[in-house]
Image (spheres, coloured by chain):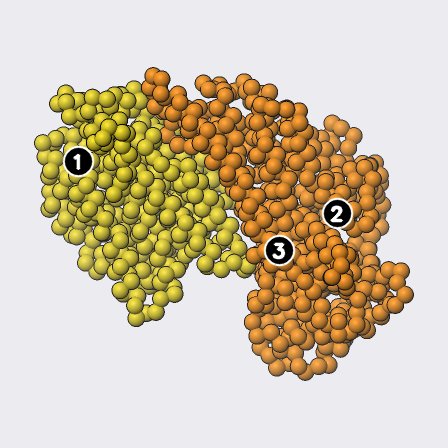
Amino acid sequence: MAAPLALVLVVAVTVRAALFRSSLAEFISERVEVVSPLSSWKRVVEGLSLLDLGVSPYSGAVFHETPLIIYLFHFLIDYAELVFMITDALTAIALYFAIQDFNKVVFKKQKLLLELDQYAPDVAELIRTPMEMRYIPLKVALFYLLNPYTILSCVAKSTCAINNTLIAFFILTTIKAAVHTCENEEQGLLDLFLGVCHDVCGKPSGNRLPLLLPSQLLGFHPRSLWLYCWVSPDFKLSCAVKEGLSVPDLTPNIGLFWYFFAEMFEHFSLFFVCVFQINVFFYTIPLAIKLKEHPIFFMFIQIAIIAIFKSYPTVGDVALYMAFFPVWNHLYRFLRNIFVLTCIIIVCSLLFPVLWHLWIYAGSANSNFFYAITLTFNVGQILLISDYFYAFLRREYYLTHGLYLTAKDGTEAMLVLK
Amino acid sequence: MGLLSDPVRRRALARLVLRLNAPLWALPVAWLERTMRSVGLEVYTQSFSRKLPFPDETHERYMVSGTNVYGILRAPRAASTESLVLTVPCGSDSTNSQAVGLLLALAAHFRGQIYWAKDIIFLVTEHDLLGTEAWLEAYHDVNVTGMQSSPLQGRAGAIQAAVALELSSDVVTSLDVAVEGLNGQLPNLDLLNLFQTFCQKGGLLCTLQGKLQPQDWTSLDGPLQGLQTLLLMVLRQASGRPHGSHGLFLRYRVEALTLRGINSFRQYKYDLVAVGKALEGMFRKLNHLLERLHQSFFLYLLPALSRFVSIGLYMPAAGFLLLVLGLKALELWMQLHEAEVGLEEPGGAPGPSVPLPPSQGVGLASLVAPLLISQAMGLALYVLPVLGQHVATQHFPVAEAEAVVLTLLAIYAAGLALPHNTHRVVSTQAPDRGWMALKLVALIYLALQLGCIALTNFSLGFLLATTMVPAAALAKPHGPRTLYAALLVLTSPAATLLGSLFLWRELQEAPLSLAEGWQLFLAALAQGVLEHHTYGALLFPLLSLGLYPCWLLFWNVLFWK
């Protein structure tokens, strides 16, 4: 499968290179949907020039990236476009191999459960065959690379692309470790949970590189937590994390925070910041309890929830969880609202620039219009994720209880999500 | 198509002009500078030049260069942070010289007053809108249209409002006001109300869209005339042209109006003193502004000068039209879904190997080909005419402007032949449902585009929706194909443009014959392309890159085998 993957990579790199050379690159790098105060390239350049002048980049309110970005781009600033194209390619390759291994695990587990007779007798059409799963890794790579959101993030040189690469490698190492140490599933799950917490805490920017190496070497131990804190010295970590958690910058973006906090009195802002940020962390525990046997699906839902509820989301975050859709395409028949939700997301993506133009340039709209589209977009995403969650659970139920359900009196039963 | 359409004549004229070493008519820059200086203004000039993408037959120009002259009246006691602009666009002949005279008289009068809190800029531009665009770009230090202009030496702070004046003679019978700007942007309604107030005070007769204000709103005549005025405004706003210098000011968030003095065969004539008084009143009122005009409506339609229709009343109409498309798409989705479930019943067909949900069974791959081909045609329509004009003039006996327009029409008509070629590329497993999936995608695409257009330029969105939505909803391969094909061709963007030209002249009570209409249509196409390149008007790219590919998709659906 190397050839189709290589072809997809070539096409993706061509599209990005063409856009980098065109006049659209500058326009895209200023769009608020694509870059946020935490991931904007302009701020990275600002931080690097502050460093060159001998001033700490964190002394102003401009630079909010982690030290990793400074170290990376201090030497690579001249090849920035190449770096971002390579990170996109690496993310796609990591996802490709991750999903390939995952499919093997899924198929093995399915075979095991079939032999153990855990499935109901009439679920033949729900069983997945290797034939249908053959092209899924390629589709995942395709979905990530040719997603307009990803292309826009790459052309805007948003550091969200680097975040995505780190998350993709994290997923790859998780799956590989789980494959190699099958018997340590519970321990793997614990570390998965911790990794997810790190995901969420590392919102300012994923400083997960230190997490990956010990994870692979040590086979996942909670010790990786202290390594994470060790790499970035205290004050820099607290600066970056404080920025993500306290939301001081209210530049409009596709998230839910900016409008709310622009209208709020200072007195209450701490309370509401806590309430908003709890949303990101809170769903981890119930989801972990419910999805303890399906870690990758749990990861998918968690990444989606982070992309929706984080303080400065961009379309690059949305693109990462959208890349996973081909993995769950066997759930398609159980999805209830996919048409309406796809329409909502496409319409909102197109209306973002229109209403921004009407607000900022034409002056005939105001921030309420833009926030309305933001709200609709996020509601659409939330409904999409809950639809996938419902479909997943429904399929699991059917697998163990049979496809054609009958109630106690023999009539056909309906499955309801409570 | 004009003086410059014959290449031989063009060369002769160019040689003659070169020998004279002078343009045919130029702004008397030195005299203007002297006069403005003697009045007491700070005078500056700005030179600009631009090579148009192809010769402009209507204004007879190709390589344009000129000079703008402007004088700043500094407010005696203010800090020069805000300013007002009175602009007189001078064309390539001396049609607007009366307005220059009025401008200088007003400048002399204003100079003697002490109550000015904002600076006033008196701007005389050459080559009317091109000069205004050059001045505005240099003033705001941007370069959006590729104009080469010298930087401005003197500025006067943020412009709060602007009035453009066009007078054809030294007595006027009525003043016509134009509000529609570039890409359908409108000034704040307060500015129009200001103008109307001062006209009433001075007893001046004012018209909107060239029509008098209806007096009798109780019988049928008043509303009917109001409807005509409204339709005229809709057509003008939909064209997206700047109908006067004010249209270019609106892009920079400067509220602006154009006042035209009309001298018709009416008995009672006003001299320029009356017009000057009205202008003075307007400027004194604008002088009092503490903040930019933002209290009144920005989006409205005008059936008369004293009445308006606000967006809350007219937007639901567009919303319902787009709902039709949405419901049709939903119906197609349900049909596709039922067909898919029906297919799965008998033997459990393998699940769709398609990742993206909206198309299933048919497969995404079979939709990509028509989409790409239609979009490529749209791109060809956008890029080729201007790019290929020189090649066309070498091989055919046409001038460049004609070549551009004829290439446009040729590519547009060539799109009609597409369905017979697309099907060779497309292979579908379920031909009956292939067209449903394509129509679903095309309906959503059309609804999205019309929605975005309706938000920024309501008239254009509504006009296109009323014509394209019924044809799009009805298009299908079964049924009376010739009837549907005729309907689809009649509602295509080009036919809408042609029809609206006829309607516009009909409403202005100067109906066109077919031949005249066709000539006007060709001129309108050339103007549309030119205005996109010179001012950044969006009608041409929207129609060629957005609506034409969408229309082609419906044409493909109609001729689906």
Residue to which mark 2 is pinned: B504
Q: Is B54 in front, or is A250?
A: A250
Q: Earlier in the sequence, mark 3 or mark 2?
A: 3
Q: Is B295 in front, or is A334?
A: A334
Would residue B439 appear left or right of A318 to someone viewing this image?
A: right
Question: What percent of the width, then of the height, locates residue B107?
Answer: 74, 73
Marks 3 and 2, how far apart in space? 19 Å
Q: Label 3 marks which chain's residue? A: B
Q: Amino acid at mark 1?
A: Glu
Q: Which element type, helix, strand or loop, lies under badge 3?
A: loop
Relative to B423, residue A416 above or below: below
Marks 2 and 1, how far apart in space? 69 Å
The label shown at residue A293 is: 1
Same subunit, labels 3 and 1: the answer reads no
Same subunit, labels 2 and 1: the answer reads no
Q: Label 2 marks which chain's residue? A: B
Judging by colour alone, the chain drawn in yellow in this rendered image is: A
Colour in which chain B is drawn: orange
Classed neighbour count for the residue bearing mark 2: other residues with Cα under 10 Å, few (<14), some (14–19), many (≥20): many
The label shown at residue B185 is: 3
Q: Residue at x 19, y 29 (%)?
A: A400
